[in-house]
Amino acid sequence: MKKIQIFDRETEDGISDSVSSQASIAYCSPALLVEQGDTDLSLATIISANSSGGIAESTDLYYLESVLVSTNWNGNDDVFMADATWAARDTPVDKQFNFMHDENDIIGHIISSRVIDGEGTVISSDTTEPPSNFDIITKAVLYNSWTDVENKTRMGNIIAEIKAGEWFVSMECSFAGFDYSVIDDLGNQHVVTRDSESAFLTKHLRAYGGSGKYEGYKVGRALRDISFSGKGLVSNPANPRSIILNSKSIAFSVDSSSFIGDLKMSDSKILEEQISEIKSELTQANETIKELKAEAAKAEVLSSDIETLEASVKGKEEIIAGLEEKISTSETEVSELTASLEASKTELTASQYEVKKRDEELDEVKKREKDNKRKAALVEAGMESSDAEANLASFEALDDEAFDAVISLYATKNTVVAEEATSTEEADETQASEETEEAIETPEEVFEDVVSEDATLVVAEKDEATEAMSARADLSDWISGRLNK
C-alpha cells in the first residue's frame, strides 16, 4: 500500500511522525441485526428491500448490516469526499469482522458492500457520476456455530446485546494521502490541494494536535487513497472523538480541487471590505423596499415581495453585526498588546537606571578605598597626614605602578635629607666642643667663639632647609613629567 508523502514544512513543524503513523481511523455507527421476518422499518430493512436477492439464510450465521461510512465532515474534522469514498466502495468486502478491534479475536467477516443515496436507493457501481452525498452499507456475518460451550454462550449474549442497541460497528480504514477541506465564515466550501506550499496547514488539523481553524477558516482533513480494512464490534466508546456518526456532521460536497492561492485568508481589511459591500447592498435593499411599499400603496402589490426583501435585509444586518464584532475584537487585542509593550519598555528603563546607580555607588566605594590606601602610603613615606590628604588629587591620574614609584622616590629623598641633617648636626657639635676648649684662655676669645658658633648654626640651618626644598622640587618635577606623558 502507498505511504503518505511528507513535505518539508511538516518536518519543520515537528509533525512528520504523526502524519506517517496516524494513517488510519475508526468510524462508529449502530449495528443492526437482520433476521428472517423482521418487520421493523429500520435502515437495514430498507437496504434489504432494495438489494437484489434479499438476505441468504444460514442456521450457523447471523447477518447484520450497518452504515460503514457517509460522505460528510465528521466530528473529528475528517472529511470523506465523494470522489475518494466512491473509489473505495468495494474495498470492505471479504475483510475481517473482529471484536473490539482485536485482530486476534475475529468473530465474522464482511460479505458485501453497496452504495445508497439519501432515500435508501441503491446506486449502481457502474454509475459514472455518483451523487455528491451517499452512504456505503456493508453486510457482515457473525459466526454462530461453536463447539466450545463458552464461545457459544458468549456469541449468544453478544447478539442479544446487539438487539438491545448496546453495540456499535466501528469502521476501520487506512489512507495514503489527504488534502485540506476549508469552510469560510459565510459557509463557502473549498478543497485546498496538499503540496509543498500548503503543507503549513497540516499543523492546524485536529488530527495532529491543531485547533481545526486557521485565520477564521474551519480546516479539515480530506482523505485520499482510502482502503477500508474491516470492521470492529465495539461498545459505546469512552472517547467521544471515536464516535463519528452523529447529528452534527456537516455535508461537504465539493469535489474539485483548488490551490492555496485561490483563497483569501481573512484579516481586518478584508472584513472591512465585506462590511462595506454588504452595507452597500443593504442600502440598495432599503431603497427597493421603499419603492415596493410606494408601489404597493398605489397598485396593491403583494406583500410577500416586501417580506422577502425585509428578511434579506435582516440577514445582511446580522452578518454586518458579526463582522463588526470581529473587527472590535481585533482592535481590542491590538490595544492590549500595545499596552503590554509600553509596560515592558517602562520596566526595562527602570531596570537600566538601577544598574547604573549600583555601578556608580560601586565606583565611589572603590575610589574611597584607593584614596585611603594611597594616603596611608604617603604618610608611611614621611609626608604629614594633612599634606597627604591635600595632595591626593594630584596623584589621581597615576596608575598604581607610577604611584608606587613616587612613594619610593619620596621615601628615598626624605631618608637622604634626614641623614645629611644628622651628619651636619654631629659635625657642628664636634666643632663647638673644640672651640669651647680653645676659648678658655681668655674671655674675649670666648665671646668671639660664641658669635662664630651662632653664625655656624645659622649657616647649618640654612643649608638643611635648602636641601629639603631641593628634594621637594625634584619630586614635583618628576611627578609633573609623569602626569604630562
Image (cartoon, rainbow, N blue to C red):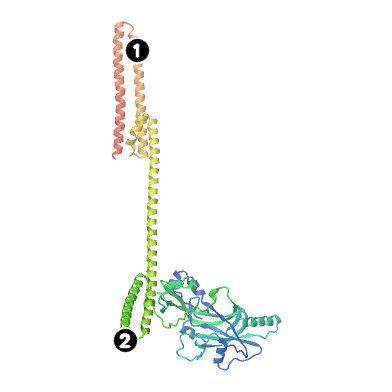
Crowdedness of circle 1 by 10 Å Cα count: few (<14), some, many (20+)? Answer: few
**Quadrant in which residue 443 is drawn:** top left
Q: In terms of depth relative to the viewer, which is nearer, 465 or 372?
A: 372
Residue 332 location, quadrant: bottom left
Amino acid type assigned to the residue bearing label 1 in the image: Glu
In the picture, the quarter occupied by the C terminus is top left
Residue 244: x and y in percent read 53, 78
Above/below status of 452 relative to 104:
above
Residue closer to the observer: 238 or 209:
238
> Badges 1 and 2: C-beta atoms under 8 Å apart?
no
Question: Which residue is the extreme one toward the top?
Answer: 442
Residue 387 image offset from top left, x and y in percent: 34, 30
Dot label at residue 434: 1
Q: Amino acid at mark 2?
A: Ala
Residue 86 to residue 371: above or below = below
Q: Secondary structure at mark 2?
A: helix
**Mark 2 packing: few (<14 Cα in 10 Å), some, or many (20+)?**
few
Residue 170 seen from this side: no
Mark 1 / mark 2, whichever is N-terminal: 2
Where does residue 435 sit, x and y in percent of width and height?
Answer: 33, 11
Residue occupying image coordinates x 31% and y 8%: 446
Position of residue 313 in the picture relative to residue 16 (left or right): left
Note whether residue 435 is visible. Answer: yes
Q: On the image, numbered disc 2 is attached to which residue?
A: 299
